Amino acid sequence: MIAAARNVKAPCSAVGGYGAGLRANEVCRLKIGDVDSQRMALRVEQGKGAGDCAMLSPVVLQRLRAWWRVGHAQGRMLPGGWLFRAWIRWTR
């Protein structure tokens, strides 16, 4: 499914969510500032349980950076630093 995607956003959100163990609504709430590439962690707001951090693999970081570059170049990045906020309507 990931290889068949026609854009960068869909596989990035899927790989990011799966690779970090996030639920769909947690992926939709990710902001650029939540990515900590030095600690290789994602800050998760309103996540399940007490933990507010998720591990960030190099592959997920690479995909997030690719989506940011493409989305930013195409003017598709959302105000406020949201990475995937437009998809929140699908998770309710």
Image (cartoon, rainbow, N blue to C red):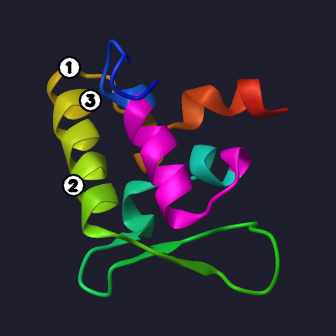
Camera-nearest residue between 61 and 43: 61
Comparing labels 3 and 2, the label whose residue is closer to the camera: 2
In the displayed structure, would residue 49 be above or below residue 91? below
Q: In screen coordinates, is 89 left or right of 10?
A: right
Q: Nearer the viewer, residue 22 or 68?
A: 22
Q: Are marks 1 and 3 in contact (CB under 8 Å)?
A: yes
Q: Residue type at mark 2?
A: Gln
- Residue positioned 69% across, 33% down in the render: 88
**Magenta-colored span:** 11-25
Mark 1, other Cα within 10 Å: few <14 / some 14–19 / many ≥20: few
Image x and y of residue 90, in percent? 73, 25
Q: Secondary structure at mark 3?
A: helix
Residue assigned mark 3: 71
Left or right of 92 in this view: 76: left
Pointer 1 residue: 74
As measured in the structure, the alpha-carbon distance from the residue carrying label 1 to the one carrying label 3 is: 5 Å
Foreground residue, 80 or 62? 62
Rendered image: mark on residue 62 = 2
Residue 46 coordinates in the image, percent (x, y):
76, 66
Quarter occupied by residue 79: top left
Return the disc, 2 or 1, that comes first in the chain's sequence: 2
Residue 41: % across, % down: 41, 78
